[in-house]
Amino acid sequence: CCPVHDDVTVKNIEDARKLHPEAKVLIHPECSPIVSSMGDYIGSTSGIFDYVKNSNDNPVYYIEYANARISKILKSWNKPLEAKEKYNNLDDELAYNILNKLIRFEDTIIGAANKKQPHIVCNYVYELATLFHSYYGASKFITENIEYTNEKLLLLQAIKIVINNSLNLIGVIPREEM
């Protein structure tokens, strides 16, 4: 018997589910049978790590997936991107939401550092990835219109830079492919 696993109680699981109803409960098989029956996944330590690492419920995986999607789109465009003074094609609500999020990056980092709360960076980059995934589902990035494509890809490049910088700050090496 393991004293650590014996300390996990039904009340612990119930309290955790009340606090985080959307969370998955991952259980070691050494826990009591009644506690094990309450888990969403039962596995060894390495099995739990693999489950978390490769799950869409894993926020780092979700963020890295955004980065990999952007990388793939940018690699598919074989022409140089040119910054402009005025952008005419970033005129939809999703693009504005992303731009507003990108503008807050520096203040977010400074605030997280001053407060010594790195989770602020984690929350920020997760929200940015969520905005990107919505944008990805609603937009076409590469078209026959070179100006349109250039502007959309520059926005993606900016998102990618901020995602990479955020992940580097929290010690995660971003993946280019998934």
Image (cartoon, grey):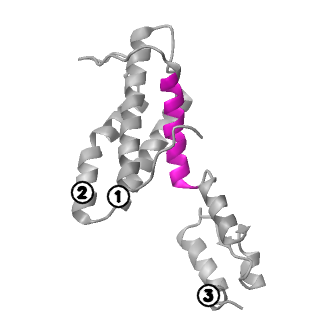
Q: Main secondary structure of the magenta part?
A: helix
Question: Which label sits on residue 4?
Answer: 3
Could you tell whether 109 is left or right of 51 in the image?
A: left
Q: Earlier in the sequence, mark 3 or mark 1?
A: 3
The amino acid at mark 2 is Gly
Q: Label 2: which residue?
A: 111
For the C terminus, the quadrant is top right
Q: Nearer the viewer, residue 152 or 20?
A: 152
The amino acid at mark 3 is Val
Question: Which label sits on residue 120?
Answer: 1
Disc 3 and disc 1 in contact, CB within 8 angstroms: no
Q: Is residue 118 above or below residue 36?
A: above
- Which contiguous range is marked in magenta? 58-75
- Please tell me whether residue 137 belongs to the stretch shown in magenta: no
Q: Is residue 33 above or below residue 22?
A: below
For the N terminus, the quadrant is bottom right
Q: Earlier in the sequence, mark 1 or mark 2?
A: 2
Label 3 packing within 10 angstroms: few (<14), some (14-19), many (20+):
few
Q: Residue, x 63% and y 53% (percent of image)?
A: 54
